[in-house]
Structure formats: C-alpha cells, structure tokens
Amino acid sequence: MDAHIITWMEKIKAASHIKPTPAPETERPLAPLIQRLQKFIAGLPPEQRTQPQSLEFFRVSLKGRQGRQAQAGELGDILRKLGYTRLRGWRDGGFKATWHAPK
C-alpha cells in the first residue's frame, strides 16, 4: 500500500477511541407558556393583578419561540383557560381590548 494510505489508516485507528464531546447547551428549553404565564401573574403586585390589562402587556413580558414575543393567539387561548375574559370596545379615540382577571 501507499505510505499516505497507511498513515491515514493509522490516524483513523488512533482517533477511533476518542469520543466526541457534546456541544455545550446554549439555552434551556422554555417551559410551557401556561406555566410561564401563571408564574408571571403570580409575581405581579396584587393591585396590578386585578387591573384590566392589554394583551401586549402580557406579550412583551413573556418570551416566545426563537427569542420572539409570545404569540397573541396562543396567549389569548391560555388567558381564557385561566379564567380571564376579554372586553372589547371603542374608547379614548380608538379600539381597545382588555383582559380582566377572574373574580
């Protein structure tokens, strides 16, 4: 055999006992949105928990997939599951929807 093939085979044999090191974990996977939302709401001051809030108030506070904000549709569904109700109306010169905490 050629010399370069022999040295190549020797390098392969020498490297075969080396195990690849796993890549470092850059980010932990996010907890389900419902759990993160419940934790966020629990961390609010009591007077702020009972005030009507816009959907954007929740969206900017919760991280979504791929570093973005939480998706509005998914967040609205979870707020309904938690007992929140949405009131829509034209106020202060424009449309405004607010989410009200369960009583």
Image: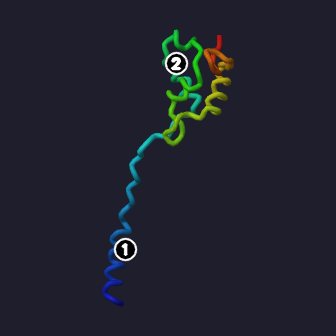
Up the image or down, 55 lies above or below 21; here it is: above
Residue type marked 2:
Ala
Q: CA distance from mark 1 to mark 2?
A: 57 Å
Using the image as rendered, state which of residue 41 and residue 8 is in the foreground: 41
The image shows residue 92 at horizontal and vertical percentages of 61, 15
Disc 1 target residue: 12
Q: Give the structural element (helix, strand or loop) at label 2.
A: helix
Q: Residue at the spot x=46%, y=40% of the render?
A: 28
Using the image as rendered, state which of residue 49 and residue 91 is in the foreground: 91
The image shows residue 32 at horizontal and vertical percentages of 57, 34
In the figure, is residue 23 to the left or right of 57?
Answer: left
Q: Earlier along the polypeptide chain: callout 1 or callout 2?
A: 1
Q: Residues within 10 Å of mark 1 (few under 14, many from 20)?
A: few
Using the rendered view, name the quadrant where residue 102 is placed: top right
Furthest residue in direction front, as rendered:
93
Q: Residue at the spot x=68%, y=18% of the render?
A: 89
Disc 2 target residue: 42
Up the image or down, 77 lies above or below 91; here it is: below
The image shows residue 67 at horizontal and vertical percentages of 49, 39
In the figure, is residue 62 to the left or right of 13?
Answer: right
Q: Residue at the spot x=42%, y=46% of the render?
A: 25
**Quarter that holds the C terminus:** top right
